[in-house]
Image (cartoon, helix red, strand yellow):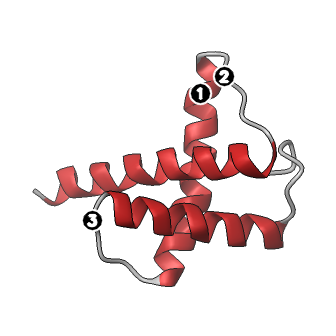
Amino acid sequence: MEQAGIGWIAAIIIGGIAGWLAEKFMRSDMGVLMNIILGIVGAVIANAILGVFGIVLGGWIGYLIAGFIGACVLIAVGRAIRR
């Protein structure tokens, strides 16, 4: 988050939006707190994965995109584990 120039409050807001978008895209049903957690953790995971390939997403939009991608991955992994 610090590398992207985003503070904690902005990370919570952007993470919540990214988690909500992923929830709608994946047709999942979660609460606001879980959306925020999915968005923030998803952004960290997606940035790590994309960093391996040399892709760096910065700023608010980059954090939102990474959060969305990571949250979708986390939802898919959670579904696979439940089955």
**Residue 64 falls left or right of residue 74:** right
Residue at 50% x, 82% y: name it: 32
Which residue is disc 2 drawn over? 55
Residue at 30% x, 76% y: name it: 29
Tag 2–tag 1 contact (CB < 8 Å): yes
User: Tag 1, which secondary structure?
Assistant: helix
Q: Position of residue 78 (x, y in %)?
A: 28, 57
- Under mark 3, the amino acid is Arg
Image quarter in which the C terminus is found: bottom left
Q: Position of residue 55 (x, y in %)?
A: 66, 22
Which residue is disc 3 drawn over? 27
* Residue 54, quarter of the rendered image: top right
- Under mark 2, the amino acid is Ile
Looking at the rendered image, the disc whose residue lies closer to the viewer, 3 or 1, is 3
In the rendered structure, which disc, 2 or 1, sits on the residue that comes first in sequence? 1
Q: Position of residue 67 (x, y in %)?
A: 58, 52
- Other residues around mark 2 within 10 Å, as few (<14) / some (14–19) / many (≥20): few
**Residue 10 falls left or right of residue 69:** right
In the rendered structure, which disc, 2 or 3, sits on the residue that comes first in sequence? 3
Which residue is disc 1 drawn over? 50
Eyeballing the image, is 11 above or below 52?
below
For the residues labelled 3 and 1, the Cα–Cα distance comes to 24 Å
Eyeballing the image, is 34 above or below 22?
below
**Residue 71 falls left or right of residue 26:** right
